[in-house]
Image (cartoon, rainbow, N blue to C red):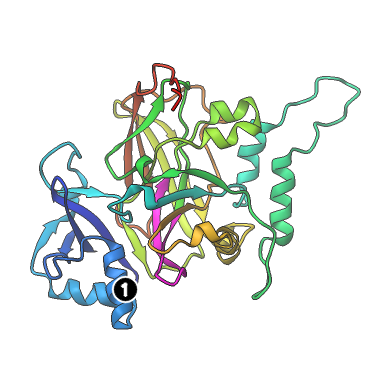
Amino acid sequence: MNPLSVVQFEISPGERRLGVIRGDELLDVTSVEPKMQRVTDAYRQARSQGILLIELLSQLANRSTTRLNYPQLLGEEVSTNRPVLRPPVDLADPYRVLITGTGLTHLGSMQSRDQMHVVAEKSPTVPAAPITDSRKMFEWGLAGGRPSAGTRGVAPEWFYKGNGTILRGPGEPLDIPDFTQDGGEEPEIVGCYFIDDDGQPVRLGFALGNEWSDHAVEKQNYLYLAPSKLRTCSVGPELVIGHEFQEIELRCTVTRNGKTLYDSGTLWSGEKHMCHSLANMEDHHFKYPPHRCPGDVHLYYFGTSKLSYGSRDWTYAAGDEIHITAPQFSAPLVNFVQKSTESLTPRGVICA
């Protein structure tokens, strides 16, 4: 069966729908099954019927007579009262959505990270800068990130990004908080998972993602990597079900007032271009019991091979647009940058 592209959208604020993309048409699945408002609803029904998620959604799409213009929906502003797209996988309770990621997974990722973490020695008596921890971890991945079936390989780098409250969909803003000076795009593939009633992780599919981070903070000291990740991020617009994770072509561009500031060129993701296998990353993520709580959703960023941060002479400004495209996904993930003043006042703590 061919891969299937699925979206979640609203026809009015708060009225959730699930749809299947075929060409320029969005087939409204919720119009056939009114209780099926999210991908997780569809998975539960597919499991109860003993069929695959892709089979159920294909059947329902064939029965749908409610169709929307997908390109028009992609262009809608999120602030309007017209139908708008939402992240392709989420839950009504955002605190049950766990967003995480891994780095140093791609064969080209070492250079970007090393540029931030290495400090060149100026002394003529020192022939070379020391090997960074990032390089050591990357080499561990090269040596043991693809274990044979039934064995556990070396663990990849892992970080916590936040819960569903920081998740943004297509057309929504990515924040630069007042306590930092810059933002940083990270064009990636996101694995989308649901934990079923038995505590079994289920891979729903893959989506485009922008793992928006704070590379300026990370550059100060690599031990700041953890707080540098606590930022908004985006996923979407489509969940692709049934696609192999072997080779995925990506591209990222940043525009300001219609002028291109950055063009990544061709980026490659997928197992063919990574030092860790998909199975190894999933094994290490879900080996922890708290990551197997029934009813939770996990959005897991798989890393990127290139960042703009190490080569640019500009910083992000409000209104900048970030486009991430991939031929395997019929539509790009587009977000804009905004300055956030939510935490402008220092946060005090009161006693109970």
Secondary structure mostly seen in the magenta stretch: strand
Position of the C terminus, as image quadrant, is top left
Magenta span includes 198 = yes
Residue that sits furthest to the left in the current view? 65
Q: Is residue 135 left or right of residue 272?
A: right
Residue that sits furthest to the bottom in the current view? 50
Q: Which residue bears the numbered disc 1? A: 54
Q: Is residue 335 left or right of residue 25?
A: right
Residue at x 8% of width, y 69% of height:
65
- Residue 150 image point, x, y percent: 65, 75
Viewer-side residue, 21 vs 345: 345
Q: Is residue 22 visible in the rendered structure shown here?
A: no
Give above or below for 62 relative to 262: below
User: Bounds of the magenta span?
Assistant: 190-210
The amino acid sitting under disc 1 is: Ile
Check disc 1 and report its element: helix, strand or loop.
helix
Viewer-side residue, 156 vs 230: 230
Q: Is residue 51 left or right of residue 140?
A: left
Position of the N terminus, as image quadrant, is bottom left
Magenta span includes 20 = no
- Which picture quadrant has residue 329? bottom left
Give above or below for 137 relative to 151: above
Label 1 Cα neighbours within 10 Å, binned few <14 / some 14-19 / many ≥20: many
- Residue 338 image point, x, y percent: 33, 27
- Residue 236 image point, x, y percent: 33, 51
Residue at x 47% of width, y 33% of height:
184
Q: Is residue 139 left or right of residue 213?
A: right
Q: Is residue 83 visible in the rendered structure shown here?
A: yes
